[in-house]
Image: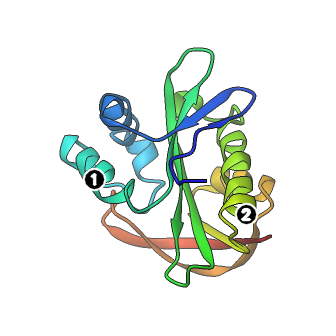
Amino acid sequence: MDDGEELWTGRLYLRPPGWADAAAVIAICGDWEVARRLSRIPHPYGYSDFRFFLEQVVVREPTWAIVLRETNELAGVIGLAPHQDGESAELGYYIGRAHWNQGLTTEAGQAVVRLGIEDFGYPRLTSGYHADNPASGRVLAKLGFKPIGVSSRMCRAEGKDKPAINVELLA
């Protein structure tokens, strides 16, 4: 299976992001409340950041737009960043504030975790979240990730390192 595979869940269609997603992604990532919870997203977030995402990130990391099947609205993005060991990958995601607390991230995560373990063959997935974002910790726990330690993770939006909880999921 290739990295650009489409995935379907009960409420979601996961597909590769494209240029037509620029406005939606810029709106989501441009929201301070979203950006301050992430490591790699700058703030403000503009077209050049989206271009970098498509041209530099999506081509190297399996990435999916999280699209609501009912309305065709892009709600967020999820992906797997392969580690250099070739044996593991890091799960990352974000979802627009209008879609928080609806279980959409968990639903998308279940599909991507399954793909990462079963189809891509990763025996181990990792992730992490800033300590001030317990909602992300709850999503990861629902997906089966277990805490393995604490660290400091960059928050580009805030321009500083922040305390973080590291988690892993073994196949």
Tell me, for residue 55, which label it has, or none. Answer: 1
The residue lying toward the viewer, choosing from 165 and 2, is 2
Q: Amino acid at mark 1?
A: Glu
Mark 2 residue crowding within 10 angstroms, few (<14) / some (14–19) / many (20+): some
- The residue under the point 61% across, 53% down is 1
The percent position of residue 46, horizontal first and vertical second, equals 22, 42
Tell me the SS state at disc 1. Answer: helix
Residue furthest to the left: 48
Can you say whether 26 is above or below 142 in the image? above
- Could you tell me which quadrant the C terminus lies in? bottom right
Q: Looking at the image, can residue 33 be seen?
A: yes
**Outermost residue toward the bottom in this view:** 85
In-image side of 130 versus 57 (left or right): right
**Residue denoted by label 2:** 117
> Could you say where residue 67 lies in the image, as x and y percent from the top left?
55, 29
Q: Earlier in the sequence, mark 1 or mark 2?
A: 1
59 sits left or right of 94 in the view: left
Q: Find the residue positioned furthest to the top.
A: 71
Disc 1 packing (10 Å; few <14; some 14–19; many ≥20)? few
What residue lies at 66% left-to-right and 42% top-to-bottom?
108
Q: In terms of secondary structure, where does tag 2 sit?
A: helix
Residue 77: mark: none
Q: How far separated are the C-alphas under marks 1 and 2? A: 26 Å
**Residue 92 vertical placement versus 108 (above, below):** below
Nearest the camera: 1 or 72?
A: 1
Identified at 70% across, 56% down, the residue is: 113
